[in-house]
Image (spheres, rainbow, N blue to C red):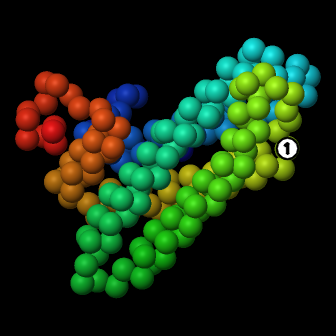
Amino acid sequence: MALTLPGHSAPAVGFEVPLEMLAACHGRVQHQCETLLRLLAHLQTHGADRPAQVAASAVMRYFDTAARHHHEDEEQDLFPALLESMAGSDAVCLRDLTALLSAEHRELERRWRTLRLRLEQVAGGHAATLPDAEVQGLIGLYERHIAREDAELLPMAQRLLSDAELDRIGLAMRARRGAFDPAAPAAARLD
């Protein structure tokens, strides 16, 4: 379920709408999880043929970069901004939520590292299997994690964060990816 913010219903989202960008990333994670499921079935029938190699490489590329950046976006920028927005208030619920989500990030990353070793074998064309329990465990945790972020975290951020804070988060996300717009004013480029 994608986050819909008033005035921002375009299918393509960018750094200027960081909450929508984070929500869109959830859809891309789900797409990669679907690819993992298809790859699981494909390997049983066809082995590590060329399509399996391409799929394994694409999934590794996504989780090694975009998914990692997504976790960093949240932990380095969004979570601190939310906690700061509650300064002086009783932010126990928010602290608990961000701590839980951070712990889930660590578990997702641990599970990814284990599964990635097997995907490297597939990408290299070597006979390999993907244990159903490993794939299903990663996907199940991502499904629960995404549902929590979509239902709790992103709507809370939409309510609590100012436009200026959202702009700052968007710039930090852009910088993390080295994605500067040469047409942007120098002050906004952070370079």
Between 176 and 19, the residue placed more toward the observer is 176
Q: Is residue 38 visible?
A: no
Q: Quadrant of residue 110?
A: bottom right
Q: Quadrant of residue 76?
A: bottom left
Q: Is residue 148 left or right of residue 80?
A: right
Where in the figure is residue 52, as x and y percent of width and height? 76, 22
Q: Is residue 143 left or right of residue 167?
A: right
Which element is circle 1 on? Answer: loop
Label 1 crowd (10 A; few <14 / some 14-19 / many >=20)? few
Between 51 and 122, the residue placed more toward the observer is 122
Report the number of discs. 1
Q: Residue, x 90% and y 28% (percent of image)?
A: 44
Where in the figure is residue 174, as x and y percent of width and height? 29, 40
Badge 1 amino acid? Pro
Residue furthest top in the image: 50
Q: Residue, x 52% and y 64% (percent of image)?
A: 101
Q: Is residue 75 left or right of residue 56?
A: left
Q: Is residue 62 visible?
A: yes
From the image, which quarter does the C terminus lie in? Answer: top left
Between 19 and 170, the residue placed more toward the observer is 170
Q: Is residue 155 above or below residue 94?
A: above
Q: Is residue 69 left or right of residue 182?
A: right
Where in the figure is residue 6, as x and y percent of width and height? 30, 44
Q: Which residue is mark 1?
A: 131
Q: Residue, x 44% and y 45% (percent of image)?
A: 69
Q: Residue, x 51% and y 43% (percent of image)?
A: 67
Where in the figure is residue 33, as x and y percent of width and height? 67, 38
Q: Is residue 42 above or below residue 81?
A: above
Between 112 and 3, the residue placed more toward the observer is 112
